[in-house]
Amino acid sequence: MLQILQYIGCVLTALVGVYAMLKPKSTVGFTGLAPEGGRGITEIRVVFGVFFIVLGLFPIIINNPIAFQMLGYAYLLVGIARIISIFVDKSSNTSNWQSVVFELVFGVILIL
């Protein structure tokens, strides 16, 4: 069951990347970032798109526990940084807290 959840975490990561790569202007709702001009659109395509695709697919492709754990630690640290940022930047909203839950839950699942 744990391995299935780990694969789900990786696939969801890659799917977020596919969505951002194909529809960068539609990511405003879950990132809060507005792509302005060609440069902004390109950044969303590559940072939230291709980078997330690679992060999600790499552990599946090489099928090595350390790759799953790397993605898990990345999610955990991003979740912790997001919690700090929510308070420092006064950015407490539903979307941010949903991201924290996703990041922490999948971080733990991928590390185990």
Image (cartoon, helix red, strand yellow):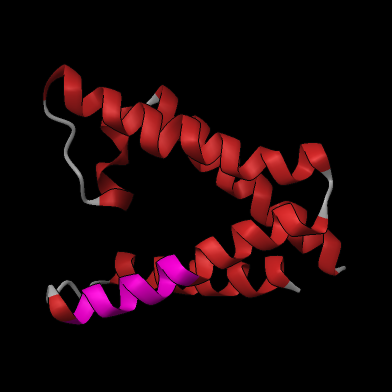
Residue in the foreground of this view, choosing between 8 and 88: 88
Q: Residue at x 81, y 40 (%)?
A: 62
Q: Residue at x 63, y 59 (%)?
A: 70
Up the image or down, 64 lies above or below 93; here it is above
- Report whether 17 appears left or right of 86: right
Q: Quadrant of residue 110?
A: bottom right
Q: Quadrant of residue 22?
A: top left
- Report whether 93 appears left or right of 72: left
- Secondary structure that dominates the magenta span: helix
Give the position of the N terminus as an image quadrant.
bottom right
Q: How many marks?
A: 0
Residue 78 highlighted magenta (yes or no): yes
Task: Name the spot of residue 23 as percent of width and height, x first.
Answer: 37, 26
Give the position of the C terminus as an image quadrant.
bottom right
Q: Quadrant of residue 91?
A: bottom left
Q: For the view shown, which residue lies furthest in the top direction?
A: 38
Up the image or down, 75 lies above or below 92; here it is above
Up the image or down, 84 lies above or below 37; here it is below
Task: Name the spot of residue 107 as percent of width and height, x first.
Answer: 59, 69
Q: For the view shown, which residue lies furthest in the front direction?
A: 66
Q: Residue at x 20, y 45 (%)?
A: 33
Task: Name the spot of residue 32 as percent of width and height, x first.
Answer: 22, 51
Q: Which residues are magenta?
A: 77-87
Residue in the foreground of this view, choosing between 76 and 93: 76
Residue 62 highlighted magenta (yes or no): no
Q: Residue at x 42, y 65 (%)?
A: 78
Task: Name the spot of residue 30 as percent of width and height, x first.
Answer: 33, 51
- Report whether 69 appears left or right of 46: right
